[in-house]
Amino acid sequence: MNLAELFSLTLHARYVRAENDASFAFHRENGTLYILFEASSGSTDWENNLDFPALPYRDMPHRWMCHRGFLRVWKSAEPYIAEAIAKTHETHVTVSGYSHGGALAMLCHEYIWFTHKPYREHLRGFGFGAPRVLWRLPGTLWPKERWQTFTVVRNLDDAVTHLPPAALGYTHVGTMLEIGEKGRYTSIDAHRPESYEKSLEEYISAAGDPWHV
């Protein structure tokens, strides 16, 4: 499955909705468990998107801080994700989300890396058009190794991928993969799913299939 196919799977999955409008889906294919998170789909999602004061992820010796609204939604999804992983027979896990869902994918990726060590070697995560989630002050240490196999896919000029502002202490994690052509879209249009579909198709056509997900 290439990135365009993963994005299509993420867009068209049949999502289950839990508390705080946490929307997730599972797909199993060729030994891989795909954990998918939906883009914003209602007023509750937008309320959580805009609730961006930072909170500690959990009470632990080496705490890291993240976006409060996304953390609230993730905590609603976490028990269902934990149950699915506990029951799966797949050896690989790929986490994917678009927009709001990309933020949840980032938190889910860290959760699996931290709590399910056998999957670390075969864990991949992708946040298409994902906003920033992690908060830190300049010079502070943070557990960046947890997101070494997480990739933010940014269609150039996509405004959502620049929020919350870095000036407020928010940062992306993992690898940033930029696709598309700068100046082709407005900052809003660059975030639309059809714009991502076009840019992903062009990227794969030019680069072959460098990602196997």
Image: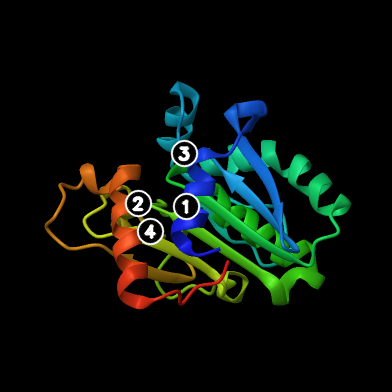
Q: How many marks?
A: 4
Q: Amino acid at mark 3?
A: Ala
Label 3 and label 1: CA atoms lie apart by: 12 Å
Considering only vertical position in the picture, is 101 above or below 62? Answer: above
Secondary element at tag 2: helix
Residue in the foreground of this view, choosing between 11 and 169: 11
Q: Quadrant of the N terminus?
A: bottom right
Secondary element at tag 3: loop
Q: Residue at position x 42%, y 30% from top?
A: 46
**C-beta proximity under 8 Å, tags 1 and 2:** yes
Considering only vertical position in the picture, is 148 above or below 54? Answer: below
Q: Amino acid at mark 4?
A: Gly
Q: Position of residue 96 (x, y in %)?
A: 55, 54
Secondary element at tag 1: helix
Q: Which mark is residue 197?
A: 2
Sequence order check, earlier mark of 4 and 3: 3
Secondary element at tag 4: loop
Sequence order check, earlier mark of 3 and 1: 1
Sequence order check, earlier mark of 1 and 2: 1
